[in-house]
Image (cartoon, rainbow, N blue to C red):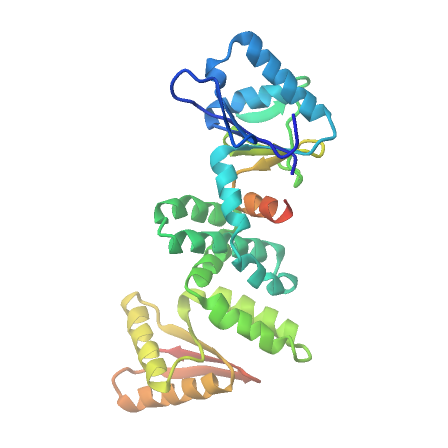
Amino acid sequence: MGTIIIFDKKFRNLILDAFGKKIKNGIIVERDGGTAVLTTNGETVAAKEFAGIKHGSEIFIKNDITSLIEFAKKK
Amino acid sequence: MSDNIVINFNILSGDKKYDIIENKYIILDPNKFSKEEIKELLEAIKSMRESDDDYLVMEKDTFATVQEISKINEFKQIEKLKPVLTVEDYQALEDSIYIDYLSKADRRKEIGKYKQQIIRRFGQGGNIICNLYTAGYFHSIFIPLYEDLSKKDGGIDEFKSTFDKLIRDFPLAIFINHLMATDEVKTLIKNRILHNLKYGIKKLYVHGINKTNCKNIQDAIKLLDEEHEISFKITALEEKGDIILVTLEF
């Protein structure tokens, strides 16, 4: 694992902005174009479900327990 | 940004904008940065994003949960069941391991939200799997059953069928494991019948695996019948190899 950035919930929007994303209607979308980001399972990511982003064409991770276990097993 | 560095965007007390711990852990408080400094920070993240370097960005409480999950050994113990369960049942089982971990760590307040997630994603079947796992049935019944059946021809299919049946029957079923003597089995069956009657349920499925349990169950039912305290009848008895299922109605 290279660089790990952890953020307090309060700075979520700053982090998303750094990755060229924003929140629209509660869903995380590309700042340019407004396309919703997807997880590797093809699911959209609600802002409240956002856990993080991993390198690899920006893999978005959701914060439900099934997604976190799947992520923990792969890392 | 360098390898193996952890940067934590967090709130710092006092006047500090950042704090460095052990040269590899940096805490930054963007609240205390100027607009220009924030811009530089975002540019640095952008460069990281555009480089080939590996990175992970994660909300801090979630990161702590992932670190915990990584240390739980029980995930390895259930891996043998992965080829024989559906994807959803296996995922529900893995989620249940974390709930069991929280329960054992006396962090029961956190369990509710994860239980809701299991039910939302996997329905009642997931809920039942969770209840069975936290009650110890996977280690005392399902895994030994799988290890037994997997050695036999057709055993895997039999395991899958038995597992599905056990999940379906769970609210009306009891499972007898090898640590129970006949008297204990008799008491368990009797108490469960009385419990079910209290809620208007007039049926009980008694499941057991291995020859000792099969015999104990049949002996226990015979003893219960001879006591004449509870009126019941055996409406079905399936005995296949080392597996027994007795249906009692009352």
Point 57% across, 31% down: residue? B24
Residue B22 percent across, percent down from the top left:
52, 32
Residue B113 percent across, percent down from the top left:
42, 43
Question: Is the residue B123 above or below the residue B151 in the image?
Answer: above
Point 32% across, 86% down: residue? B224
Outermost residue, right side: B52
Residue B239 appears in the figure? yes
Outermost residue, front side: B22
Question: Is the residue B63 above or below the residue B51 in the image?
Answer: below
Question: Is the residue B140 above or below the residue B180 in the image?
Answer: above
Rendering quarter of residue B83: bottom right
Q: Is residue B115 left or right of residue A71?
A: left
Quadrant of the snapshot with the N terminus of chain B: top right
Rendering quarter of residue A33: top right
Quadrant of the snapshot with the C terminus of chain B: bottom left
Point 49% across, 33% down: residue? B60
Residue A20 appears in the figure? no
Point 64% across, 29% down: residue? A37
Q: How many marks?
A: 0
Question: Is the residue B230 above or below the residue B112 in the image?
Answer: below
Residue A34 percent across, percent down from the top left:
65, 20
Residue B212 percent across, percent down from the top left:
47, 87
Outermost residue, left side: B229
